Amino acid sequence: MKTKTLPGPVVGIVGGGQLGRMLAEAAAPLGIELVVLDPTPDCPASPVCRDQIVGAFDDPDSVHELAERADTLTFEIELADPDLLERVSEKFGVEVQPSPATLRMIQDKLVQKRALQDAGIPVPAFRAVDSPEELRAALDELGTPAMVKAREGGYDGRGNVPIEDSDEAEKVLEEIAGRAMVEEMVDFERELSVIGVKGSAGHSPAGDRTSSDKEDEIATYVAGENVHEEEILRETVVPARASGAVRERAQAVAREVLDLLEGRGVYGIELFEREERSPSECSSEERSDSRGNGKILVNEIAPRPHNSGHWTIEGARSSQFEQHVRAVCGLPLGSTELREPVVSKNILGDERDSRKATLSGVDRLLAEPLVHLHWYGKREVRPLRKMGHFTVLGGDQSVEELLESARTYRRHVEFEP
Ligand code: AIR
C-alpha cells in the first residue's frame, strides 16, 4: 500500500454547519484542510476551514467547484444531492465517501427501513402511506398512537408527526406535505445510539476493531443514551444506563448496520431499547430470535457524524469527527475507547422569535471546571435551533450526577431577548 504523506489532502464537504465546523477542528491537527459548500455566507464552519463556497447544496456549479478544489468529497447534511455527487465524482475523478448510493438509500426513510428489514436487522413495524385511507388502514394494524414520518427532507425533528387517532389522518398528512410512512410507536425503555465508523481495508488491527485485507475496518463506540423532547435531542448520557448485555447488543446491531452500508465514514445509528414484554406479546419471529427477543430495534441511520456522538470529542480517545476525516481520507482509524463517563447537553434556541444570537452567562458556564463548551457560531437564534452544546465529564461523578450537573449548568446561560 502506498504510504500517506503530509501535508494531507483537501476534503470538500457539502454543508458547513456545526458538523462541518467540528470536522474542520478535528482535521487541522492531521494536516488535512477542508473546503465547505454552504448557502449561508459565513456559515459555522467558515471561520475554521480553508474556504467556503457560498452556494446551494444541490447547485451544479458550486458542487463542480468543490470537486475541483478537493481530493475527496463528503457531506455533513442529508440534503446533499447523490446524483450530482455521482456525476462530479466521475467527471473529476474524486471519491465521494460515504457512497452516494448510501446517501440515496438513507434519504428516503421508507427505502432505508426496507433495506434494514431485508437484511434481517430488527426495526419497528412500518407501512408506506400515500393517502388518508392508507394511513387509516395502517393504523388499524399498527394501533395508535403511531408516528407518521416524511419520507424525505426531515431533520432535527422536522417531518415527524405523532398521530393519536385515525380521525387525524388528513390533518397529519397535510402537515407532512409530501410522501409519508407510518411506524408503530415503540414502547421504549430508552433511546440509544451507537456511533460507528467504516474505514478502508488493509490497516493493521487494533483495539476493538476487526480488519483483514478484504474486509473494511469497522469500529463502534459504546452505546449512549439519548434524551429527546419534542423530537429534538437534549442530552446524551454515556455509557447508556442500560444493562451491559443491552449495550453490547446495541453495538452488535450497529455492526450489522455498518456491514450493510457502502462507503467509508462515520454513521450515527439510533436505536430503541424496547420495554420487556411477555412471550405472548412477541411475534413468532421475535420468539425464535435467539439474539435478544427483539429488544433492540433500529430507528434511523445518519450517514455522517451525529449529534449524539458529540461527547466523543472529550469522552473518547478519538472523536467521531476525527474518525470521519480519517475514514474518508483512507487513513487508519483511531481508537473508539471511552475515556470516562460523560454527558453532553445541547444548547437549543428558546421559544422566542428568531433574532440575533447573543448568549449571556457564558463566564458562569466556563467557570465550571468539568464543562467543555462548543459554540457553533450561528448568527441567528431560532426556536429549538441547535446553537451549541457542552459536555460534562470527570470529577469521579456517576452519569446520574453528571446529568444533574449538566441540567444545572444549562441554566447558567440564556439567549438575550
Ligand atoms: N445537521 C445535519 N443534519 C442534521 C443536522 N443537525 C447539521 C449540519 C448542518 C446544520 O445542522 O451541520 O449543516 C444545519 O443547521 P441549521 O441550524 O442551520 O439548520
Image (tube, rainbow, N blue to C red):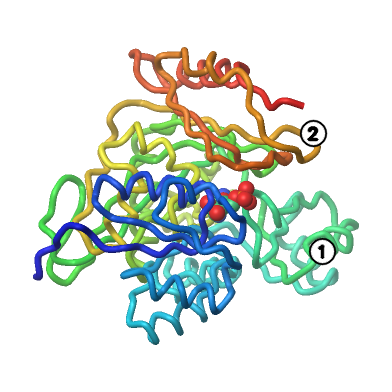
Q: Is mark 2 within 8 Å of ligand 1?
A: no
Q: Label 1 amino acid? A: Leu
Q: Label 2 amino acid? A: Arg
Q: Position of residue 195 (x, y in %)?
A: 39, 48
Tell me, for residue 352, which label it has, or none.
Answer: 2
Viewer-side residue, 162 vs 165:
162
Q: Is residue 157 left or right of residue 235?
A: right
Secondary structure under the numbered disc 1 in the rendered image: helix
C-alpha separation, residue under disc 2 versus residue under disc 1: 27 Å
Q: Position of residue 7 (x, y in %)?
A: 20, 58
Residue 401, placed above or below residue 235: above
Bin the neighbour count of mark 1 within 10 Å (Cα to Cα): few under 14, some 14-19, many 20 and up: many
Viewer-side residue, 125 vs 61:
61
Tell me, for residue 173, which label it has, or none.
Answer: 1
**Which numbered mark, 2 or 1, is in the foreground of this view?**
2
Secondary structure under the numbered disc 2 in the rendered image: loop
Q: Is residue 38 left or right of residue 256?
A: right
Tell me, for residue 307, which label it has, or none.
Answer: none
Q: Is residue 1 left or right of residue 122?
A: left
Q: Is residue 395 left or right of residue 192?
A: left
Residue 192, placed above or below residue 238: below
Q: Quadrant of residue 227?
A: top right
Q: Is residue 241 visible?
A: yes
User: How many numbered circles are shown?
Assistant: 2
- Residue plotted at (40% across, 72% down): 99
Q: Quadrant of the N terminus?
A: bottom left
Viewer-side residue, 132 vs 265:
265
- Residue plotted at (53% across, 47% down): 44
